[in-house]
Image (cartoon, rainbow, N blue to C red):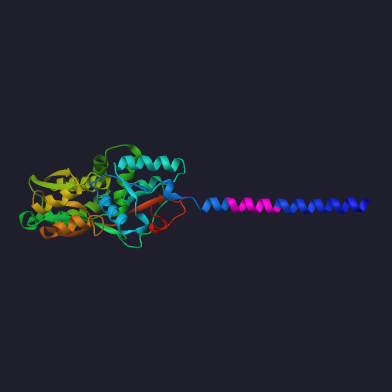
């Protein structure tokens, strides 16, 4: 009798274990199933969170949406850089999916280091690019000292980002921090002004874009040129106007041309009437950027609507 009970108990125990094992197995399956099948496309409502309508990255992203079958039916939401950064902050705080139009140099990667660029196999955003200096035709003959100085102007991503990060952290004006940067980096600035003769209060017109990166570059160049006696005006306008006004000779130069990718169309339309002095900064980049917690790596991991 005891044996029978023991056998039955053993049987019940084995069955219970099997049931438990089966349950936990299927639970496990459902969990992993859920994790890997998050529908990011639906979660972001087939929308890329973008910036201002006049930006190069906006034009390029519209091209990307057209060229990738995976993005057919997708929408690029336009507003402002500040609004995009606010959306990004909200998404990251709640660990929700978001796809933004991102770039370097900017403070976004200093503030949110756990983000990644999505691969772009069609190479529309391209790899790294430069920020070029463009002058009006004839500047070299008319104003050789100014031409020489802007031609010698160059710095790197870390320089520019140090100004942008500080402005974002302290809330101070970029132009004020740029002025301080020139004071703190005499060696670098001396290379830009090397061999440039002083002038006596000569007007020089720089045209630029309204983003922090260009407020930083135009800010430092303005101070460096004023040390040599120039009187520099910086006018921030839409990208299209930057290229047109230099090409028309309405202004002297810009140091805000992201090439060869971001401002490709603007450059192509005006290049016959521009003098391209080459990059003043190397290693700029644009693309679609997502938080690391999103389990996708490429634009081709997205799905058409
Ligand atoms: N940006 C920053 C600009 C240039 C500087 C990438 C937002 C754009 O034209 O897209």
Q: Is residue 42 visible?
A: yes
Q: Nearer the viewer, residue 55 or 159?
A: 55
Q: Nearer the viewer, residue 183 or 78?
A: 78
Lateral position of residue 299 relative to residue 136, left or right: right
Q: Nearer the viewer, residue 215 or 143?
A: 215
Q: Which quadrant of the view contains residue 129? A: bottom left
The image position of residue 3, as x and y in percent, is: 92, 53
- The residue stretch that appears in magenta: 21-30
The image position of residue 148, as x and y in percent, is: 13, 57
In this picture, is 181 found above or below 274? above
Outermost residue, right side: 1
The image position of residue 17, as x and y in percent, is: 75, 52
Overall secondary structure of the magenta section: helix
Q: Nearer the viewer, residue 138 or 176?
A: 138
The image position of residue 22, as x and y in percent, is: 68, 53
Q: Is residue 147 magenta?
A: no
Q: Is residue 195 visible?
A: no
Residue at 18% from the left image edge and 57% from the top image edge: 267
Q: Is residue 28 magenta?
A: yes
Outermost residue, top side: 171
Lateral position of residue 202 relative to residue 242, left or right: left
Outermost residue, left side: 142
How many numbered circles does the render carry?
Answer: 0
Lateral position of residue 158 relative to residue 263, left or right: right
């Amino acid at each position: 009798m005891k044996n029978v009970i023991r056998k039955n108990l053993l049987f019940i125990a084995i069955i219970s274990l099997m049931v438990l094992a089966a349950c936990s197995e299927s639970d496990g399956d459902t969990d992993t199933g859920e994790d890997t099948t998050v529908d990011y496309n639906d979660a972001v409502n087939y929308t890329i969170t973008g910036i201002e309508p006049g930006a190069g990255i906006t034009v390029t992203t519209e091209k990307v949406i057209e060229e990738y079958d995976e993005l057919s039916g997708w929408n690029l939401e336009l507003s402002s850089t500040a609004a995009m950064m606010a959306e990004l902050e909200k998404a990251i705080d709640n660990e929700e999916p978001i796809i933004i139009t991102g770039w370097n140099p900017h403070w976004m990667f200093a503030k949110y280091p756990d983000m990644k660029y999505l691969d772009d196999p069609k190479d529309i955003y391209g790899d790294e690019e430069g920020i070029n200096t463009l002058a009006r035709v004839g500047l070299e003959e008319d104003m050789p000292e100014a031409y020489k100085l802007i031609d010698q102007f160059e710095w790197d991503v870390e320089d520019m980002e140090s100004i942008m990060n500080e402005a974002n952290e302290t809330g101070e004006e970029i132009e004020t921090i740029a002025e301080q940067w020139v004071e703190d980096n005499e060696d670098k600035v001396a290379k830009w002004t090397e061999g440039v003769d002083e002038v006596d209060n000569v007007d020089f017109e720089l045209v630029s874009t309204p983003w922090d990166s260009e407020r930083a570059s135009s800010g430092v160049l303005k101070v460096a040129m004023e040390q040599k006696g120039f009187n520099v005006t910086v006018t921030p306008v839409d990208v299209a106007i930057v290229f047109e006004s230099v090409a028309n000779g309405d202004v002297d130069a810009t140091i805000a041309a992201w090439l060869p990718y971001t401002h490709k169309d603007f450059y192509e339309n005006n290049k016959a009437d521009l003098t391209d002095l080459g990059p003043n900064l190397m290693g700029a980049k644009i693309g679609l950027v997502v938080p690391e917690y999103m389990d996708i790596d490429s634009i081709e991991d997205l799905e058409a609507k």
